[in-house]
Image: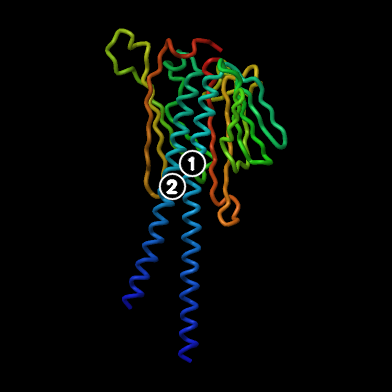
Amino acid sequence: MELMVGTALGSLLLIGVGSLYLFSAKSFVSMTNYVDLNSRNRRASDLLSRDIRSATAVGSSTRSTTNSQIVLRSKQGDVTYAFDETAGTLTRSQAANTEVLLAGLTSLTFSLYQRPATGAVYEAFPSATASTAKLVGFEWTCSRKVYGTEKSSENVETALVELRNQ
Amino acid sequence: MIATLILTLGVVGLYGAYSFGFATIKIAQEDLGADRIMVQRLETLRVYDWSRITNNYIPTNLTASLGTNGGIVYQVEMAIDPAPLTESYSNTLRQVTVSSSWDSGGVTRHRSMTTLVSQNGIQTYKP
C-alpha cells in the first residue's frame, strides 16, 4: 500500500517537474527566438533602408507567386533584394557579393509610390512604376518554430523609405 | 512543509521571471513599432515642399497602427516650431517633433523624436 502511494506521488511529482522543464525550455527558446528575430529584422531593415535612401532610381520591381525582387540603381552599382518564398530567404546581391539577410520569411512585398499630387491629402501617395518611384515600401513576416509549433515566434517588419537622390 | 514551500517559491519565481521576460520583449516590440511610425513620419516629410511644411499642411494629430503588436493604436502628434536658433538663417529652418503615445499594460507610454528641417535642404520641386 505504502509502495503504491509512494509510486503515485512520485509519478505525479515527476510529471510536474517534467511539465515545468518543458514549459521552461519552450519559453526560453521562444524568448531567444524573439530577441534574435528582432535583431536580424532590424539589421535587414536598416540595410535595405540605407540602400533605398542612397539609390538613384528603382531599376525594376517584380513579383511572382514564389518570389519578389527589387533592383536599386546606385552609383556603386545595382543592388538586388530577392525574396525566395520556397526557401523563405531574403538575399541582398551587389556585384559578386551575395548575402542571405533573413531566413524563415513567410511573406515579403515591395510597393512603389510616387510623390504626392498637388492638393493631395497628407500621406496619400499614388502607386508608381519603377521609373516613377519616389518611395519604396516593404513589409515582411518572419517566423520560427518552437518544438514544431508554427509561428510561435513571429515578427513583422514594415517601412516606407524615400529615394533621396531621385 | 519546508520543501513544499521552497518548491512553490521556486516555481512561482520561475514563472515570474518568464512573465517578466515576455513583458520586456513585448515592450521592446512596442517601442520598435513606435520608432518605425515616427521614423516614417520624418521620412515622408522630405517629399513635401517648404510651403507645406510651414503652412499647417502637416496634421498635428493622427493615429497609426502596425500589423504587429496585436493591433496597438499609436497616437501620433507632430509639432512644427521655429528652430531654436538665433542665427540669421534660423527662419529657413523648422524644428519638427514627432511624439507617439500608446496604452500598454494599463500604462500610457510616450516616445518622441526631434529633427531640424531646412528650406534649402528639402525637396524644392512643386508637384
Q: Residue furthest right?
A: A65
Q: Position of residue B43 (x, y in %)?
A: 48, 24
Residue type marked 2: Ile
- In the rendered image of this protein, does residue A56 appear above or below residue B39? above
Give the quadrant of the C terminus of chain B: top right
Chain under label 2?
B
In front of the other: A136 or A82: A82
Q: State the residue at coordinates (46%, 81%).
A: A9
Residue type marked 1: Asn
Q: Which residue is mark 1?
A: A38
Chain under label 1?
A
Q: State the residue at coordinates (69%, 31%).
A: A63
State which mark lies toward you, 2 or 1. Answer: 1
Helix, strand or loop under label 1: helix
Cα–Cα gap, marks 2 and 1: 10 Å
In front of the other: B125 or A73: A73
Task: State yes or no: discs 2 and 1 in contact (Cβ < 8 Å).
Answer: yes
In front of the other: A133 or A95: A95
Q: Position of residue A19 (x, y in %)?
A: 50, 67
Q: Which residue is mark 2?
A: B25
> Residue B18 occupies which quadrant of the picture?
bottom left
One can see residue A164 in this view: yes
Q: Position of residue B93 (x, y in %)?
A: 37, 14
- In the rendered image of this protein, does residue B50 appear above or below residue A26? above
Q: Residues within 10 Å of mark 2 (few under 14, many from 20)?
A: some
